[in-house]
Structures are given as C-alpha cells and as structure tokens.
C-alpha cells in the first residue's frame, strides 16, 4: 500500500539529490540557472504537491482534460475523425480557443502531477508498481478508443498505410496525389502533399492497420491506436520486471501522465522506437556473446526502420564498448542492424530514402536554429545557405551537448544507459525539427538511472515542446 511521505525535521534534501552517490552539483560550482531551479524545486518538493494523493489527483485531472478533448472531436486539437468513445459528446468544432485551453491546462497539470509523484517517491513513497501498471492500463484502454489529440500524425500514418495496402508506394506519392478519399480529407492540411518520411517497418505496420480498416480511416487509426497502447503497456511491464528500481521506472514510464498524453493520446510511432530501444539497452546490460549482440542489432535496425533517429541508440550502445576497446561487439551489433534495416528497405526500394533527406530542411520553433534562420534572413542571407549551415552545424552541436549531458550523470552509472540517454536528449535539444513525443527514448533510458539533475530538464523540455507544438493538424510554429 502507498504510504505518505515523511518530512524530516532537518534541512530538506534536494528533490534531485541522489541517495547512493555524491551528486555532481556538489562536485562543481552550480550555475545561476541551476541555483534558481534548485531553489524553486526545493520549495515545491516540500509543499502539498509532494503528497502522493495530491500528485495523483492532479495527474488524473490532467489526463481527464486531455481525454475530454479527444471525446469532443473534432476540434482544433484533434483529427476530424471520431473513434468509438468520441461519439457520445458533442464536438467542440465551433470554437478554437476552448479545446486549446483544455489541452494546455492538461499538459501543465500532467507535468505538475508527475513532479509531485517523483518528489513523493524521493521522500519515501513506495507505491506498488503493479497497481500503477494496472491503473495506467485502464486509462490507456480508454484513451486508445478516443480520437488522437495534439497532432495529426495518426491521419498521415493511416493514409500512408492505405496507399501501401492498395499496392502503392507512399514514398513516391502522397495522400493528395493518390486519391481524393476519406483518408486524404483526414490528413492535416500541411501534410496532404507530403510523401512518407517514416521507415519501411513503420509502413508495414501502417499497411497492416489499413488492411483491417479498409476504406474507413477511423478504423485504421483505431487499430494503430490499440497497437500503440499495447506496446506502451508492454514496455511498462518489461520495466517492472527488469529495472533495479521498478517503482521509479514505472513512475517514469507507465504512470507518467506527460508520456501517456504524448505517446498514447497522440498515438505516435515513437512508442515503438522507445520499446525497441529499452529492449536493446536491457539486453546490452545483461547479455554477452554473439547471440545477444545480433539480437541487439536487430532491435536497433528495426527501430531505425521506423524512425531513423534511432541510429543514436546504436551509437550510444557502441560508445562505451569502443571506449573499453571492445571492437568486435560494436561491429557485430552494427552489422546486424544494417542487415535488418537493409531488408526493410528492399520492400519499397531506395525511393524510401528520398523523403527522409527532404525532412532535413525543416526548422521550427522552439528550436534555437529557427531564431538563427530568422536572424540570417533578416540580414539578407539566402535561405538555402542558412539551411546548409544548420545542416552542418547541428550534428556537431549534438555531439558536444551529448558529452556535456553524459558528464552530468554520475560516472558509476551504466554507460549502456547513460550514453543512449545523452545522445537522444541532446538530439531533442539541438535538432532543428523536434516534437514532445521525440523524448520517448530519453524517458525510457532515464528509467534505469537513479535520481539525477537531468530529470527536471527532460520534464521541462517535454512540456515546453508540448505547449509550443500541439495541434490537430494546424501548421506548427516556424516553417
């Protein structure tokens, strides 16, 4: 049974201070931002927000508000289709502001609820993770039957799957060019003429869903929502069974209201990428030998065949091996990943790579590169030149930020976890085109690391992205 946190009489411990090692904050001087953030967190961490009942109530309200948006589809924050549980309430399509206010409030409350639960855990709250898993499974079961909220990606998934299921190639055509049908109408305005930018394994999954949905995009989207929700809970079960601290891992993933909103309510493919990533990470920590390396490589190749940024997981796992001069293992893992990915691309050919590289030209706020682009354009620099500069510079920035993040976590933590986290979180921070659900892999990796200063920043970045880039298909900020 859950117990209320205890508040010792002495000076409160920082909500981010580890109990098993000396934190890096005490090993080097803190910057102004860290000091201010630490003071705010210490104040909140010992407020009523850290009471488990209060934190869980706030989380529940945040999730409920998000589900209300899904239940009142279509509106400004949802797709135009209506899934089974979105047919009982009238749509909020008559006003843009109300649906947006509801979703933004849901996001803020989910963040506060998550913070409160983590602070309660740091003060001694030890809920049974099995009950958290069951409660989350019930919420997910309801959520996958509601219209996706906060993004139009699910409609694009369905349209690409529909094209593939009918024998077309979604990498050389697009929803608008293929047919003027219900699938095309469901796709967000700015994506109707966009070929698929997802990997071949993603298209296989989308085509499977479309083969069940037939001419009905709502049915296709529902199938993908169910698959996505099942994977999300499956990852939670894996973390429950394999994590050193199953309570922390469950709070970070299965019971994390921010992730539930972004991954399950939005129905994003990043859930599958994170699932493959955490399986590969846990195997790398526990399994040795060629069989384990091959399986790790297959998982990485599969993840890359969904979204190509999963290559960062492979680099993160290879990094500590190379530092230890274990040359054979990364070669085996890399070879297995390349073979797996190559097999995927044989399904649709090299045309599947073309839209992928076209996506490298996209820049959006709140990425700092968008500000760089706007300043450059104001100074008369051509957009093509600016894009070239950004394309060259952001991978270099990613490396330096990843090294910084890696060093911010105690050196006694497993590098097979810390390195993939550092790379995927650095990518979210410096890439020109990112969304809140792109943080899924970083969250999955962080479930395996004891309390550390990166937790607060990952939560803040995720919520900031959710607030800035949340819509049902309306053009994102920037370009």
Image: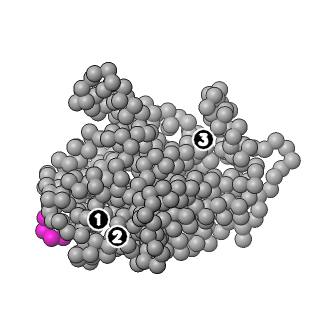
Label 2 neighbourhood size at 10 Å, few (<14), some (14-19), many (20+)?
A: many
> Would residue 34 be found to the left or right of residue 282 on screen?
right
Position in image of residue 305 (x %, y %):
27, 56
Position in image of residue 303 (x %, y %):
33, 56
Which label was assigned to residue 202? none
- List the residue tagged with mark 2: 81
Q: CA distance from mark 3 to mark 2?
A: 41 Å
SS category of the residue bearing label 2: loop
Q: Quadrant of the N terminus?
A: bottom right
Identity of the residue drawn at 68% across and 43% down: 41
The residue nearer to you, when weighing 27 against 194, is 194
Label 1 neighbourhood size at 10 Å, few (<14), some (14-19), many (20+)?
A: many
- List the residue tagged with mark 1: 186
SS category of the residue bearing label 1: helix
Is residue 465 on the magenta stretch? no
Q: Quadrant of the C terminus?
A: top left
The residue nearer to you, when weighing 442 against 187, is 187
Q: CA distance from mark 1 to mark 3?
A: 41 Å
SS category of the residue bearing label 3: loop
The disc, 3 or 2, on the residue closer to the chain's N-terminal end is 2
């Amino acid at each position: 049974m859950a117990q209320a946190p205890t508040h010792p009489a002495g000076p409160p411990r920082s909500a981010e201070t580890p109990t098993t090692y000396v934190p890096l904050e005490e090993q080097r001087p803190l910057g102004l931002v860290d000091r201010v953030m630490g003071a705010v967190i210490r104040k909140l961490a010992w407020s009523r927000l850290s009471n488990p009942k209060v934190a869980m109530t706030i989380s529940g309200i945040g999730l409920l508000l998000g589900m209300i948006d899904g239940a009142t589809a279509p509106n400004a924050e949802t797709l135009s289709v209506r899934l089974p549980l979105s047919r009982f309430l009238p749509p909020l399509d008559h006003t843009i502001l109300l649906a947006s206010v509801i979703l933004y409030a849901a996001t803020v409350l989910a963040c506060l609820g998550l913070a409160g639960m983590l602070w309660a855990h740091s003060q001694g709250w030890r809920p049974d993770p099995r009950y958290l898993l069951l409660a989350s499974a019930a919420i997910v079961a309801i959520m996958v039957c509601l219209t996706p909220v906060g993004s139009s990606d699910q409609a694009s998934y369905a349209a690409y799957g529909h094209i593939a299921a009918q024998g077309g190639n979604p990498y050389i055509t697009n929803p608008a060019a293929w047919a003027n049908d219900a699938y095309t109408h469901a796709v967000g305005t700015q994506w109707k003429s966009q070929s698929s930018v997802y990997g071949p394994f993603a298209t296989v999954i989308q085509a499977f869903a479309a083969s069940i949905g037939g001419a009905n995009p709502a049915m296709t989207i529902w199938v993908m929502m169910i698959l996505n929700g099942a994977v999300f809970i499956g990852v939670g079960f894996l973390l429950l069974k394999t994590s050193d601290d199953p309570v922390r891992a469950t709070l970070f993933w299965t019971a994390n209201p921010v992730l539930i909103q972004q991954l399950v309510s939005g129905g994003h493919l990043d859930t599958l990428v994170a699932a493959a990533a955490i399986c590969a990470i846990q195997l790398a920590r526990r399994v040795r030998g060629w069989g384990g390396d091959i399986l790790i490589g297959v998982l990485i190749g599969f993840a890359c065949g969904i979204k190509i940024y999963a290559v960062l997981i492979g680099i993160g796992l290879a990094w500590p091996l190379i530092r230890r001069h274990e040359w054979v293992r990364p070669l085996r893992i890399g070879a297995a990943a390349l073979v797996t990915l190559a097999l995927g691309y044989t399904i649709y050919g090299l045309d599947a790579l073309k839209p992928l590289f076209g996506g490298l030209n996209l820049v959006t706020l709140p990425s700092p590169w968008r500000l760089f682009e706007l300043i450059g354009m104001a100074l008369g620099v051509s957009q093509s030149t600016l894009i070239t500069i950004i394309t060259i510079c952001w991978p270099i920035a990613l490396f330096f930020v990843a090294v910084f993040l890696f060093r911010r976590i105690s050196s006694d933590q497993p590098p097979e976890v810390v390195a993939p986290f550092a790379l995927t979180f650095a990518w979210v921070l410096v890439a020109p085109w990112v969304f809140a659900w792109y943080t899924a892999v970083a969250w999955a990796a962080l479930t395996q690391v004891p309390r550390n200063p990166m937790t607060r920043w990952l939560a803040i970045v995720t919520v900031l992205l959710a607030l800035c880039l949340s819509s049902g298909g309306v053009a994102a900020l920037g370009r």
